[in-house]
Image (cartoon, grey):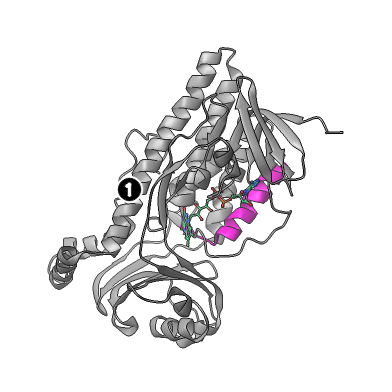
């Protein structure tokens, strides 16, 4: 006999950073929040992911969970100096004063696994219901809401579903929503190394054409407890050889003091997707797609989680408004506003991250421009500033966004 479905007003699918942010926003709005997660409780999520949490993200999280931003900032790291090198020569450096005591810093650099730990604690304290081992395999929507089914045959119904089930989103696929965009053809090796007992100064360093690694670009970013090292491969490089064993240790020793080569926590190879869902909702306006279920960007510029958190907050607000109004047209409009505004932001972020990728893979003309800028940087600070900032894409906020930076 099949079990009857369980009902909740709003269900969040996925307990990644975006799903947990959505749950916190729902609780802050006075709504119950239930999160269905495929993984088991206390699952370990391997791999290098977000480290850079922008202040705008901290502010959104702190509105729904007062004190959370302070915890993330206190446990993260803020580097005060950034440097850019071209072919081994420094072309730009800037230092900033330390964050004001008691104020939120401009950013905090913290491994995603830690950010998720604090989010989970905040969710539990706020009374969020988690249902682990609940992989959604089916989603259908209709005029009254959505129905979900798990791999074990459990069924759930809700007036609204916030889909935060990541890049391979089963909810998005079940609804037939497609993604549009491209995949970069260049490869990157991304490595996290643990800090040693003799820590390096916490500085963000970008090398164009690092001479010790045959002119490949290298980005070094400190985070609480370690370093993120991105190596941009040349065309024709073997990603596997440079991400494992002796091949990995050889280039790591060339860009960091040798003691770090034996402290590798994760090493992964990437070709980055730059894609956005064609719609952030379904025809009945019952499912709201958020985070990587709705968009994937290259990580330069740190727009993934930093835009997923505002997606989550906007989705929770839209679901709350839709549940509060007795007028179906207003409920539809709330979800449509969410879908249009967050998709517009995602397209902007995709293109901004795409600009960063294009800068990192210059054509012949751009290569000349970069070399000229590097030559002129000693006399013209604007050239050094351009070399320093361009690898992360434009800094403007998405058009029409008044509340969210990303
Ligand atoms: C190398 C790298 C560096 C990055 N650096 C940054 C950075 O500095 N700053 C930044 O903002 N972003 C960064 N990002 C991006 C960031 O990691 C992602 O944007 C973020 O993890 C997306 O969160 P999410 O919650 O949408 O998806 P996920 O983190 O993928 O979470 C999805 C959750 O849904 C669950 N799930 C999946 N399928 C189902 C299902 N069928 N049913 C139920 N549950 C399901 C999963 O188990 C998971 O818990 C980086 C990414 C990479 C790869």
Q: What residue would you read off at disc 1?
A: 351
**Percent coordinates x, y for residue 336 in the rendering:** 47, 26
At x 69%, y 53%, the residue is 39
- Taking 181 as reference, is 138 left or right? right
Q: Is residue 271 magenta?
A: no
- Taking 118 as reference, is 262 left or right? left
Up the image or down, 247 lies above or below 109; here it is: below
**Percent coordinates x, y for residue 228 in the rendering:** 47, 69
- Local SS, label 1: helix
Point out the stretch of residues depicted in magenta.
Answer: 108-129
Closer to the camera, 354 or 130? 354
Up the image or down, 231 lies above or below 19; here it is: below
Where residue 188 sits, quadrant-wise, is bottom left
At x 54%, y 80%, the residue is 196
Closer to the camera, 372 or 104? 372
Task: Residue at the far right: name it.
Answer: 1
Q: Is mark 1 within 8 Å of ligand 1?
A: no
- Taking 375 as reference, is 389 left or right? right
Closer to the camera, 152 or 158? 152
């Amino acid at each position: 006999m099949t079990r009857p479905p369980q009902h909740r007003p709003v269900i969040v699918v996925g307990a990644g950073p975006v799903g947990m942010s959505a749950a916190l926003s729902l609780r802050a709005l006075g709504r119950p929040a239930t999160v269905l997660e495929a993984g088991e409780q206390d699952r370990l999520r391997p791999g290098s992911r977000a480290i850079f949490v922008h202040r705008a993200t901290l502010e959104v999280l702190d509105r729904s969970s007062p004190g959370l931003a302070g915890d993330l900032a206190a446990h993260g790291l803020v580097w005060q100096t950034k440097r850019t090198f071209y072919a081994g020569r420094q072309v730009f450096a800037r230092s900033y004063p330390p964050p004001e005591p008691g104020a939120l810093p401009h950013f905090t650099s913290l491994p995603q696994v830690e950010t998720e730990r604090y989010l989970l604690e905040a969710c539990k304290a706020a009374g969020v219901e988690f249902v682990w081992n609940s992989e959604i395999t089916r989603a259908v929507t209709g005029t009254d809401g959505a129905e979900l089914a798990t791999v074990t045959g459990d069924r759930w119904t809700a007036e609204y579903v916030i889909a935060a089930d990541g890049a391979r989103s089963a909810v998005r696929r079940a609804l037939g929503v497609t993604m549009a965009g491209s995949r970069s053809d260049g490869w990157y090796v991304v490595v996290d190394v643990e800090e040693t007992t003799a820590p390096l100064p916490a500085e963000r360093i970008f090398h164009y054409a690092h001479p010790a690694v045959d002119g490949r670009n290298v980005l070094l970013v400190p985070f609480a407890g370690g370093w993120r090292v991105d190596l941009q491969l040349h065309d024709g490089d073997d990603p596997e050889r440079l991400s494992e064993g002796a091949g990995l240790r050889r280039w790591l020793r060339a860009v960091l003091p040798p003691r770090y080569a034996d402290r590798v926590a994760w090493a992964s190879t990437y070709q980055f997707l730059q894609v956005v869902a064609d719609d952030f909702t379904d025809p009945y306006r019952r499912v709201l797609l958020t985070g990587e279920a709705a968009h994937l960007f290259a990580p330069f510029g740190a727009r993934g989680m930093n835009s997923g958190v505002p997606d989550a907050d906007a989705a929770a607000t839209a679901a709350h408004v839709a549940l509060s109004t007795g007028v179906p047209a207003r409920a539809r409009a709330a979800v449509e506003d969410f879908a249009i505004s967050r998709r517009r932001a995602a397209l902007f972020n995709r293109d901004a991250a795409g600009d960063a990728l294009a800068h990192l893979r210059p054509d012949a003309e751009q290569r000349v421009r970069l070399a000229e800028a590097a030559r002129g940087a000693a006399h013209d600070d604007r050239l050094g500033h351009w070399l320093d900032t361009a690898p992360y894409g434009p800094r403007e906020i998405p058009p029409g966004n008044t509340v969210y930076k990303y």
